[in-house]
Structures are given as C-alpha cells and as structure tokens.
Image (cartoon, rainbow, N blue to C red):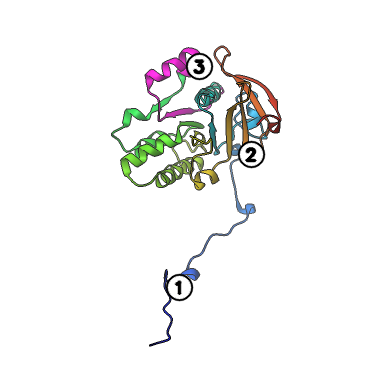
Amino acid sequence: MSNVRIKRGRPSKKVGNVLRFKPTVSTMAEFTYDKSLFKPMPTGKKVDLLLSGEGGLMKGTNYAFVGDPGVGKTTVMLDIIADQQAKGNNVLFISGEMNRIDMVGYVKRFPKFAKLPILFMGDYIENDPLVVLEAVLSEGYDVVLVDSFAEIAVAVVDYHGGTMKNAETKILNLLEKHNQANNRNKTNTAFLLIQQVTKGGNFAGSNRFKHMLTGMAHMKFDSNGDRFIFFSKNRRGGEMNKLFFSLNQNKHVGWLYTEPVNLAI
C-alpha cells in the first residue's frame, strides 16, 4: 500500500493570483475633500454635544440608536430631524413600521412633525424595497432617519429571499453610496438608524453593521423611570455623558441635564 499522504480540504490558492491582486495604498496627503464635509449640522439643543465634538451631526456619518421598549426612540429621532429641518437642512423620515394613521398621534403632540417628508415603506409592499429606497435617496438628503433598520432588512428578505445578513449588506451598500454623496445633489447624507435589540437587551445586527457605524447611542430608563441617552461609541468625539430627556414637554423633547455614565448604568 502506498505511503503517499492525501491532502484534504480546500485547494490552496496559487501565488500567481495573489501577485496579480493589487490593493490600492494611499496617504492622507493625497486625499482632497470639501471643507464643508466637516462643518457640523447643529440643532441648537443640548444633544448636539453628544453627537460630535464639533457640536452637531456631521455629514456622511451613520448613527445607530437602540434602547428599551417605550423609551421614546422614534419620538426623539423625529424631534432631532425636525430641528434639522428648521435649520434649513433637507431631511427625510423612512418608516418601515408606521403608516399615516400611526403618525397622527405623533403630530398632535409634536406639531412640527407635520412638515417632515416621510416615505412609508408600507405603501410599496409589492415593490422591491431596494429599488424604492434607491429612488427616494437619489435626490440627496442631508439627514435621513430610518425606523427601523431591521424592518427594512426584513422587507428585503421577503422580496429577494436569502438571509438577514445578506439583506443588511445590500442596505449598507446603499447607505454607503449616499454617505459618499453619490446622488443628484452631491450631498454626503448622514443616517440615523433606529435598531432593535434582543430580548436580553443586546444590540441586534451584523458585524459589518457595527463596523460601519460612526456612533452607537443607547436610550434607557434609570431606576426612577427617568429617560436618558448616551453614546458607547462615537468616532466624532462627542460627550460620553448621559443626557436625560423628557417627553412631557409641550411640543418638543425636553433636553434636561447630563450625568457621568458610570453613576447609574
């Protein structure tokens, strides 16, 4: 019997294939950019200090917002983009969960929400959700709120099949395109992404989703039932304190006071 050993498993890649692959290596000295890309978009509220070290939402960024059920994720995010709109920025709300009747209650409490442009994904349930998203985003918005990222991914799976991970990748590719201003207005779009959490309160999303985020914000109740928001990650250097807020204010979210994160988590 032969003593020749049979190598099993995946075939090795030829060195020649590696040599033909030429990754691009560059220096930041070669990189040119429009200075307005690093000009913040402030709301004029205390939350600006959490969003970035410059004091406001930055262009071409992606922030995820996760938190306890009922803590007010949608309300707070709508309040932020309404304030952005009031400052003259072009905003859009993409709703994967609500319809027009659902929005009535929000508008009654917060009349400024009435002027927000909204894409109700439920209106296009028979259409390819990726085509719908690309069509609306092609205009080029300053700030886009998506509620929720998971619901949009489910719609992509329902239409195209495949896994949630593959659906997330397709959506993230689209967001990245508009981060880089590949739209009619040549606008570096910033995305605010409401994301779901697991029953254990952990972030639900793929590794690529986590890696593409500029920042991740958490919205919680403390032991007294008070609401607060804080960032566990922020590449743009905003404050890492907790900012307490109230939904009992008249016509707007009440941004109250800050407190170090480690005191009450």
Q: Position of residue 21 (x, y in %)?
A: 48, 66
Q: Are marks 2 and 3 in contact (CB under 8 Å)?
A: no
- Tell me the magenta residue range: 87-114
Q: Which residue is mark 1?
A: 14
Q: Amino acid at mark 1?
A: Lys
Q: Position of residue 59 (x, y in %)?
A: 56, 36
Front position in the image: 164 or 100:
164
Q: Position of residue 89 (x, y in %)?
A: 53, 27
Marked residue nearer the N-terminal end (2 or 3): 3
Q: Amino acid at mark 3?
A: Lys
Q: Quadrant of residue 119?
A: top left
Q: What's the CA distance linking mark 1 and mark 2? A: 42 Å
SS at mark 2? loop
Q: What's the CA distance linking mark 2 and mark 3? A: 28 Å
SS at mark 3? helix
Q: Which residue is mark 3?
A: 112
Neighbor class of circle 2 (other Cα within 10 Å; few <14, some 14-19, many 20+) is some
Which image quadrant: the C terminus?
top right
Q: Nearer the viewer, mark 3 or mark 1?
A: 1
Residue in view at x 49 percent, y 42 percent:
205
Q: Is residue 106 magenta?
A: yes
Residue in view at x 40 percent, y 36 percent:
152
Q: Is residue 214 left or right of residue 140?
A: right
Q: Which residue is mark 2?
A: 236
